[in-house]
Amino acid sequence: MDLVPALQEPLKKVLGPATAKVMAEHLGLHTVGDLLHHYPRRYEERGQLTHLADLPMDEHVTVVAQVADARLHTFASSKAPRGKGQRLEVTITDGSGRLQLVFFGNGVHKPHKELLPGTRAMFAGKVSVFNRRLQLAHPAYELLRGGDDEGEAAESVESWAGALIPLYPATAKLESWKLAKAIQTVLPSAQEAVDPLPGSLREGRSLVSLPEALLKIHRPHTKADIEDARARLKWDEAFVLQVALARRRHAESQLPAVPRKPGADGLLTAFDDRLPFTLTDGQRKVSREIFDDLATDHPMHRLLQGEVGSGKTLVALRAMLAVVDSGGQAVMLAPTEVLAQQHHRSVVEMMGELAEGGMLGGAEHATKVVLLTGSMGAAARRHALLDLATGEAGIVIGTHALIEDKVQFHDLGLVVVDEQHRFGVEQRDALRGKGKQPPHLLVMTATPIPRTVAMTVFGDLETSVLDQLPAGRSPIASHVVPAADKPHFLARAWERVREEVSNGHQAYVVCPRIGDEDDDPGKGAKQSKQPREGDADKRPPLAVLDVAEQLARGPLQGLGVEVLHGRMQPDDKDAVMRRFAAGETDVLVATTVIEVGVNVPNATAMVIMDADRFGVSQLHQLRGRVGRGSAPGLCLLVSEMPEASAARQRLNAVASTRDGFELSRIDLEQRREGDVLGQAQSGARTSLRVLAVIEDEEIIAEARQEAAAVVAADPELTGLPGLRTALEALLDEEREQYLEKG
């Protein structure tokens, strides 16, 4: 009998259509197997209370606490019958903090009878702020009957797995305890889970079987049960993902590629001869690694990661020139039009007459550098497409417009992808499919990535790291400006901007929102990936259009202030960037469109408004736009968050170090990993559920070795049917692909 289908049973057959619909829509759970792999976020012990002091804003939470006080208020209301409305306020406590629950209207009667002082219960709802106090409005709740009486409480708590109550990632429509009951219903099917780990690996590491791990994670009797289960399930996640990546590496190593070696006295030599500076040791070392890969007869797959301003673009350009030297074409794929135009400008500037192939005045070894974006006019686009198809253009720079079917290359030899986290594997493959043989691939990222994340997310790529800044780069001083506590600090920030401008320099002001939204301005707040603590008035994030107007009329009156954001027409964006680069504009008020690649050496100051709305890596990226010339840079992080808040601690960390690798570790520790790893880890099916990429460095490294050995011995995994099944679930085409990273 084939046992696998038990876990593939649709949830609507087991739990009913209504519950299954909520699970599918809100949690991405479709089958019994999906639900069994929806693990508890944490566990509550009987008699132990949650830390109410640590509640995150704007998130759905489940807490176990005791009612301290309950009061029913009556107030005048036109909506209520007899003109009187009712509001029930219940205060719950856990010893670490207090939380207010609020019920209105007809919803007060049941809780008024049940939530008496001394009652213990589980409460679930979304944390908000009212009158500067944390509250849950209309929370769902489940009584833990019997208060602290051990005998009675045991009976109630037993239905949530004995002594330990699992609390699940939940939604407003499906509370944690309802999920727990649904999981109890399907838990017997765990016995039929087919184990993906080879027996030798499991025994060698003393790991429990998969059915046992599923049972222990959902119905633990002791903390040791949870540890056993997590140790085993972490290995599953690390190993199955690393096998997927190892198979990808193996398949690609079997593909043929044209070796691309630069000529002895060709374009690359001519370019190097006209460089006004010498390469750093790091740039030389990384270039050697890239040139060695390009010279082989199978495709290079390399990740080039480096600090902000470490000169990645120069290294990538030298690789592109080497390929052009060998008779091929090279293409650079950028995530935005602003960045594509910026790269095109800087490449043409760096190459000078070497970029004027086929033109009067072009140098002997010159080639043509062509820009291709979605918003180009028809005539310019036709011209660019012709240059690509004939091979006239040796270097092509563009956006995802390069992936379209009608784009044909004469002989595509190298694909450079800038800012990999914004492109998916599929887009990468679509572009690589345009070569007669698979082209070489170089992926650049300016976000320094800890080694484990690189192994997890970019495991199909070899990694080169540029951690040395070129000579002549200036230091950047970073300071937090506490606008609410010390408003005069903000006034001083604008004075500093004026001082920089009067010294002949320029400045950026960055805001989280554009400000031309048609609907509710509060919508902009959703852009923030960081929870907001104590933001009582819930004002929307500051907007480019509003801030630019206020600055031009107020503290920066008389200076040339312009705006730049993503919804402007491409030609307008380009014109603004050109004026700023030429020094015609003093202050550029922008969104994060300037986050990567924008290079204006004369810009020395940056003021980031509502800096707490941005992630650590993003702030580090933004800061890298200043101090690119010989004058020192200044970055001011403006925030209204209180000094004790986690948001301020995050900003202090950014201000205190320029080490991007250190900051990326802080980022991972402070935020959900899904935010950092991009879509690869978001969504229920595909997330890293128990594996933490920072803490579990050893497991990931060992899993990578084990996976490579398994794939080398049996690339098709014919002897490991359980592993094949797990891989199929991981790479399920119908849902968001696990390895899709953008």
Image (spheres, rainbow, N blue to C red):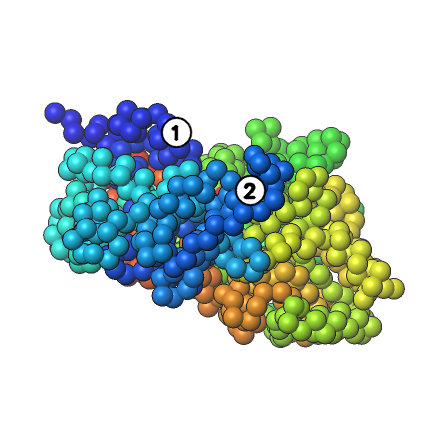
Spot occupied by residue 382 in the image (x, y as percentages of width and height): 70, 31
Check disc 2: other Cα within 10 Å, few if <14, some if 14-19, many if 20+: some
Separation of residues labelled 2 and 1 (CA atoms): 35 Å
Q: Is residue 18 visible?
A: yes
**Residue behind mark 2:** 85
Give the SS element for disc 2. strand
Which numbered disc flags the more N-terminal residue, 2 or 1?
Answer: 1
**Residue behind mark 1:** 21
Q: Residue at x 70, y 39 (%)?
A: 518
Which sits in the foreground, 403 or 124?
Answer: 124
Spot occupied by residue 375 in the image (x, y as percentages of width and height): 70, 36
Q: Residue at x 79, y 58 (%)?
A: 550
Q: Which quadrant is home to the N terminus?
A: top left
Spot occupied by residue 491 in the image (x, y as percentages of width and height): 75, 71
Q: In this image, 329 relative to 125: left or right? A: right
Q: Is residue 724 visible?
A: no
Q: Residue at x 76, y 43 (%)?
A: 571
What amino acid type should be assigned to the residue bearing mark 2?
A: Gly
What amino acid type should be assigned to the residue bearing mark 1?
A: Lys
Judged from this view, the residue extending furthest toward the front is 82
